[in-house]
Amino acid sequence: MKNKMVMLQIVPYEEIMTLSSVGRIRKLLNLAKENKIVLLQGRLKKEEEAELIKATMEEINEDFKGIELAVINPTVENLTGLKRFKNKVINALLGNRTGFTVIGPANIVKQIKKDPNKIELLTSENTNQKNKKNKRRNNKKR
Amino acid sequence: MGILALLRRFLFGWFSRKDSIKLGLYGPPNAGKTTLANKICLDWLGEEMGQVSRIPHETREIQIKEQIKIEHKGKTLQFNLVDTPGIATKIDFEDFIKAGLPEKEAKKRAKEATKGVIDAIKWLDEMDAVIVVLDSTKDPYNQVNITILGNLAARNIPVLIAANKIDLKKSNVKKVQAAFPQYPVIGISAKYGKNIDNFYSSLFKLVK
């Protein structure tokens, strides 16, 4: 049986902190398009998540099928009252660094199952076959 | 949210009783948005709104039915119903082929579906109130659901969650309620009209 390699790219929040919304989305989407599973420290703004979906749709073609996306934010989900408010203020000032965002290319990550405190990535069984098929298709086009 | 959107929201609060409001149907593909739109339109206009299919992304363009007037317990509510394409993070034409479409048609459907998702997101700013239709037989913690609800909250748009397909054995409305405790959730079967009276009551509360 051949081994399958899945590349995981960790993106610390500092790497996207100074970027504009468009820049953040572009960076994350480009990594996903390179067939990497992105593990981002923190999370995007709600509006950026929607923009990421929009940008993904614009890029979809026969080779790039889109992304799987999941945000895991266990500490914030459990906060209430004053602690929640404090957390919101900190996030507004410094950016949302709590939790993780997982972005995987859809041809590799079939599904992301979320539990409040854990995530399961279900990968495609035929990823290698699909990649080979896509390469063959690209060669034919050339 | 822009100043204009805030202003519109403010004005909506004042004039919603007088003018027709835009009521959006949002959700992931195949949750039953168009089935619910058809049920509402059949009940109050006597005609359906759009075509439904077991193959996802049947609705690929924004569809609007204007001037729907519903009556419930002596009150009336008038709105323009906006049925939107299902929001997804991935679209694979090969899935449509597996569902039985010819390759050419599958590719066309995939291309139109991507445009539909973009349009649905663009239209978020236009909505005065939204019914998020979820398939109650599926895992509600899907990130698409969370992103839609988060964006509606960020825009201060009132939301009602319709946990659809309660006629199916696997339906679990309580799971949907547990996933989104901050929103009103109503279990319905848009296909068979189950619990639809309670749905209309919730709709009045949503836009009161």
Image (spheres, coloured by chain):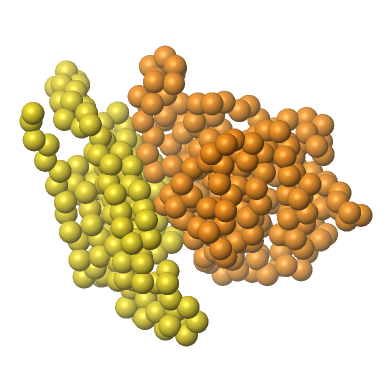
Chain that appears yellow:
A
The outermost residue toward the top is B102
Quadrant of the rendered image containing residue A108? top left
Relative image position of residue A131 (x, y in whole percent): 18, 29
| Vertical comparison of B185 with B64: above or below | below
The outermost residue toward the front is B169
Evaluate whether residue B141 shows in this view: yes
Task: Name the one closer to the observer, B91 or A19.
Answer: B91
| Vertical comparison of B127 with A110: above or below | below
Task: Name the one closer to the observer, A44 or B9.
Answer: A44
At x 30% / y 28%, what residue is drawn? A62
In the figure, is residue B71 to the left or right of A101?
right
At x 39% / y 20%, what residue is drawn? B98
In the figure, is residue A87 to the left or right of B71?
left
The outermost residue toward the left is A2
| Vertical comparison of A42 with A7: above or below | below
The picture's colour for chain B is orange
